[in-house]
Image (cartoon, rainbow, N blue to C red):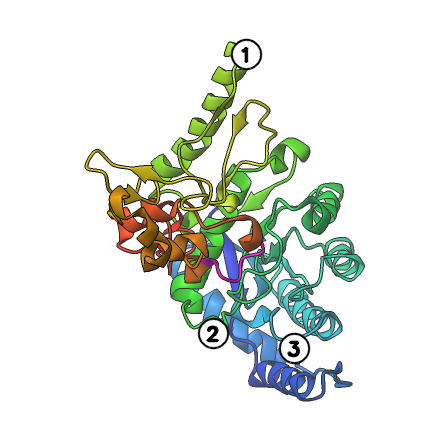
Amino acid sequence: MIIDCHGHFTTTPPQVAAFREQQTAEFLQTGRTPDLEPPAVTDEEIHEAIDKNQLRIMRERGIDLTVFSPRAMGMDHHMGNEDTNVVWARYCNALVHRACQMFPDHFVGVCQLPQAAGVKPGGRVFEELERCVLEYGFIGANLNPDPTGGRWSDPPLWDKDWWYPLYAKMVELDIPAMIHVSGSCNPHFNAVATHYINGDTTAFVQFLTSDIFKDFPTLKFIIPHGGGAAPYHWGRYRGLADMLNTAEDVLVQAGAFGSLGAEIPKCLVPKRTFKQLTIGTRCSAGIQFFVVDPSGYTRVCNHSPKRLEHVSRIELLKQNEYWRQFVQKRYLPEACADCADARHCDGGCREAAHVACGSVSATDAILSPVRPA
């Protein structure tokens, strides 16, 4: 049997998308949950939408079964509040369920969760998840790691307070989740070409650098779209995890303490407890120290390629614009500006970014497949 683990109901009748447009437009205008009834969709409309599109292509390509969920771009978590998104998710999930009932040999359901930007997944999300699994017989859920639509301002997937209750519910129901972002309201990220791949890669790195699977050994995720950047940058990600864990293990065995020679982005620091290894995420160049090179010129740190004032003119250093950029910390990369960790992180080593990418405010090269600028 050939199973397509990632299919969406992208051919719903036009009144479905029109309802969401009307719903979000009223919400944005009034700030209140619209009192709108979702429009009816007939069995004939569903049959035609499936038989002439997804099912036709499945037959042509020899696919026996598709794991089927609502349209990913249409989940639209960043556009409404939780109440609005509950109505929308229930409507979309019901349409998928009807399609699965109509073609039981070809489709099995996966649900859309009523996530909302800035709202911790809680009772409303759990209620819809349980309804779809226990009443509809769905076998999984789509989980959006960024309901903010490309702003990435909600906590990362390893945040225990924000995400762990949802993981516990998934384990209780014994279902996997497919990592899947929705639309993008960030002009840097085209939804399909960039945001989808960012979401997959970011989720993978957060899994890699956290204790999620130690805390939930039976938790299951599917990362679609070829796994984001993971298969193509595997050496980078494996090296990140191995490097830090190996350093900690060596220090423990030696009964010694140590620290990394450069800052790394906080979002990439493994969430295990490091007792011997200190991992810095804030740049202290020009604040807690500076260096003098063999020619007598000052530099903000030993990584810096830029000479500043000679020690004989050290009094001019405070007026040096490059120096002031470090002292005043005017270098956070644009790609990190909306990150929830921005208060505790400088986006990696700023001079490493300068050397690799040409600017102290450039995105750290280690983050490039995760948060491209």
From the viewer's perspective, tell me whether residue 283 is left or right of residue 23: left
Amino acid at the residue labelled 3 = Asp
Query: Mark 2 packing: few (<14 Cα in 10 Å), some, or many (20+)?
Result: few
Mark count: 3
Query: Mark 3 packing: few (<14 Cα in 10 Å), some, or many (20+)?
Result: few
CB under 8 Å between callouts 3 and 2? no
Specify whether residue 37 is painted magenta: no
Depth order, front residue of 305/163: 305
First reached walking from the N terminus: tag 1 or tag 3: 3
Whether residue 293 appears in this view of the structure is yes
Q: Position of residue 245 (x, y in %)?
A: 49, 26
- Mark 1 or mark 2: which is in front? 1
Query: Circle 1 sits on which residue?
Result: 255
Q: Main secondary structure of the magenta part?
A: loop
CB under 8 Å between callouts 1 and 2? no
Q: Position of residue 369 (x, y in %)?
A: 38, 51
Depth order, front residue of 229/296: 296
Amino acid at the residue labelled 2 = Lys
Q: Position of residue 360 (x, y in %)?
A: 34, 54
Residue extending farthest to the left is 295
Distance between mark 1 and mark 3 Cα atoms: 69 Å
Specify whether residue 339 is painted magenta: yes
Query: Circle 3 sits on which residue?
Result: 43
Residues in magenta?
Answer: 336-340
First reached walking from the N terminus: tag 1 or tag 2: 2
Amino acid at the residue labelled 1 = Gly
On residue 59, which mark appears? none
Q: Secondary structure at mark 1?
A: loop
On residue 52, which mark appears? 2
